[in-house]
């Protein structure tokens, strides 16, 4: 197939794999950690749930534009904070450098959707029988020991659902990349869906675009 001999397609595929790895090994542990943390809150529980869920309510276009401003090299919040802490050498053109554009997009995507998954995991945690939790506490399972041996094993089916949703979302990522970087600079943040879109609507190679869509599927 043409795609397997196309260097730019392999870059796009690699970036999709980065999406998947970031979701599995960074986003999922953060989701579980904050879900357990919030579930133990004694006060303002509804406030915490609303706060973490809010980004997922926003459209991807709004999220992309907001984070473009946050990553702005001069006026952006990230570089401003780094300069304020005396870390001038750590400032970057986040969306304009090949080595950082993909990372910036991954962080933005995680910020938008982590709260949605936290709410799913929280629902599973609150569904655990109090009898089971009390029995565990009597046997000495308290704090993070309780989370490790009782909470996490009992919510494993929901964690698997979140894992599958994260992977499928990573494989079909399009809008956040297109809004923030359009696959640039020099194709360094290209993913399969954006590459497919460009082949179809910029190059008019609809057959090739269709082949890429089948690979994504």
Image: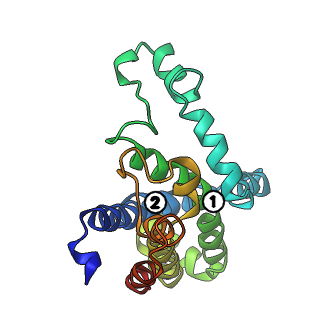
Is label 1 in a helix, a strand or a loop?
helix
| Residue drawn at point x = 42 percent, y = 80 percent | 216
User: Dividing the picture into quarters, in which one does residue 207 lie?
Assistant: bottom left
Is 195 displayed left or right of 116 in the figure? left
Q: Position of residue 26 (x, y in %)?
A: 40, 57
Q: Position of residue 200 (x, y in %)?
A: 50, 73
**Residue 79 visible:** yes
Q: Choose the circle earlier in sequence order: 1 or 2.
A: 2
Q: Which mark is residue 115?
A: 1
- Front residue of this view, candidates 70 and 166: 70
Q: Residue furthest front?
A: 204
Distance Cα–Cα, label 1 vs label 2: 10 Å
Query: In this rendering, is residue 63 above or below 217?
Result: above
Q: Which mark is residue 23?
A: none
Characterize the local packing of mark 2: few (<14), some (14-19) or many (20 or more) Cα atoms within 10 angstroms: many
- Front residue of this view, candidates 36 and 98: 98
Look at mark 2 in the image and give the residue it sits on: 27
Is 46 displayed left or right of 106 in the figure? right
């Amino acid at each position: 197939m043409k795609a397997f001999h196309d260097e730019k397609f392999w870059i796009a595929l690699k970036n999709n794999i980065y999406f998947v790895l970031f979701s599995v090994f960074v986003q999922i542990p953060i989701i579980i950690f904050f879900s357990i943390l919030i579930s133990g809150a004694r006060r303002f529980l509804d406030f915490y749930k609303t706060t973490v869920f809010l980004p997922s309510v926003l459209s991807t276009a709004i999220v992309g534009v907001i984070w473009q401003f946050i990553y702005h090299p001069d006026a952006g919040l990230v570089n401003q904070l780094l300069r304020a802490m005396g870390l001038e050498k750590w400032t970057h053109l986040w969306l304009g450098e090949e080595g950082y554009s993909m990372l910036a997009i991954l962080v933005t995507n995680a910020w938008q959707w982590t709260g949605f998954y936290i709410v799913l995991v929280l629902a599973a945690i609150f569904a655990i029988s109090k009898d089971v939790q009390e029995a565990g506490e009597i046997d000495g399972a308290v704090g993070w020991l309780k989370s490790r041996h009782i909470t996490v094993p009992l919510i494993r089916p929901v964690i698997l659902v979140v894992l599958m949703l994260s992977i499928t979302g990573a494989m079909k990522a399009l809008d956040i990349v297109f809004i923030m970087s359009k696959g640039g600079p020099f194709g360094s943040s290209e993913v399969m869906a954006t590459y497919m879109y460009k082949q179809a609507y910029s190059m008019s190679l609809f057959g090739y675009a269709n082949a890429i869509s089948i690979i994504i599927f």
